[in-house]
Amino acid sequence: MLQAERDTMRIPWRRRQTGRSQRLLELAGVKPGSVDDISDLDVCRQVAFRAARRDCGATAEVLVVVEDLLKDEAEYEFVVTLLENLQNLASHGLDTFRSPDEMRLLLGPRSMICWDTVTGFWAAVADWRVGTGAPLESAAALLGVQDESLRMLLWTTNRTLSTGEKLGIADAVRYEKAVGSPIPGFSHIAVALRITGQGSP
């Protein structure tokens, strides 16, 4: 048996992150090999959860890559997902994470437009949600989660309003279905389907 064949039998093939995903993960300090074969949604979550932290020394570098990615229209959805996750983390008002104003200061001109578009969308979701008359839930339980993996999932997919109440991806999906006004070129319905494994990667 050839050496290459023996190596193939011993080490099963795994898809590793390449290109922009690998670059962002490395900048954010994600250990090599710890996130093999993950989706773009997971890359955005992992990178945002680390880059949003005050003690992350590479936040500016991550956002430089984000700005550069926006030169390519094909990367728009990926960038919006990452920026939205960063916004959600910043919204919680936790000392661990940079504030929205601090994050905004690090954005390039293209990223700023995306950031403001995401902000405007969630403001519309909040107004619509209040208009339905159904009470919003407090963010307290969300912010009290102790498990690190669960924190990453919940804190990047929900945002805390100035009232201390929360909005999440389910609210965005309901808003899009009721009003039909998603972020241009980006749908939370599609994101929700991917999270549940019903959509394309």
Image (spheres, rainbow, N blue to C red):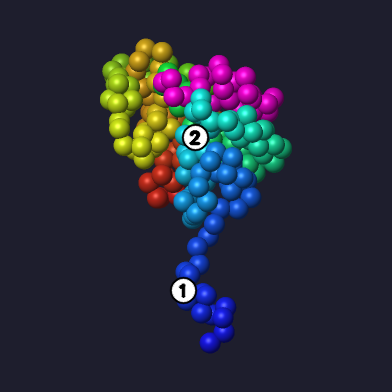
On the image, the x and y values in percent for residue 45 come to 47, 39
> Judging from the image, what secondary structure is the residue with disc 1 in?
helix
Q: Residue at x 55, y 38 (%)?
A: 28
User: In which image quadrant can residue 154 be found?
Assistant: top left
Q: Which amino acid does label 2 sit on?
A: Arg
Q: Which of 189 and 94 is in front in this view?
A: 94
Residue 177 visible to the viewer: no
Q: Residue at x 58, y 30 (%)?
A: 57
The answer to whether residue 177 is above or below residue 8 is above
Q: Nearer the viewer, residue 43 or 4?
A: 4
- Report the magenta residues as a range: 94-118
**What whole-number distance in Å separates the C-alpha atoms at marks 2 and 1?**
33 Å
**Given contact means CB atoms under 8 Å apart, are the residues at marks 2 and 1 in contact?**
no
The answer to whether residue 19 is above or below residue 69 is below
Query: Which one is earlier in the sequence, the residue at label 2 or at label 1?
Result: 1
User: In which image quadrant can residue 2 be found?
Assistant: bottom right
Q: Which residue is drawn at 43% across and 32% down?
A: 156
Number of residues whose C-alpha sits closer than 10 Å to that of mark 2, classed few (under 14), some (14–19) or many (20 or more): many
The extreme right residue here reads 71
User: In which image quadrant can residue 153 be found?
Assistant: top left
Q: Which of 137 and 126 is in front in this view?
A: 137
* Residue 10, numbered label: 1
Q: Nearer the viewer, residue 129 or 1?
A: 1
- Whether residue 112 appears in magenta in the rendering, the answer is yes
Q: Which amino acid does label 1 sit on?
A: Arg
> Judging from the image, what secondary structure is the residue with disc 2 in?
helix
On the image, the x and y values in percent for residue 8 come to 51, 74
Residue 23 visible to the viewer: yes
The answer to whether residue 199 is above or below residue 29 is below
- Residue holding disc 2: 50
Is 71 on the left or on the right of 42, as rendered? right
Magenta stretch, overall SS: helix
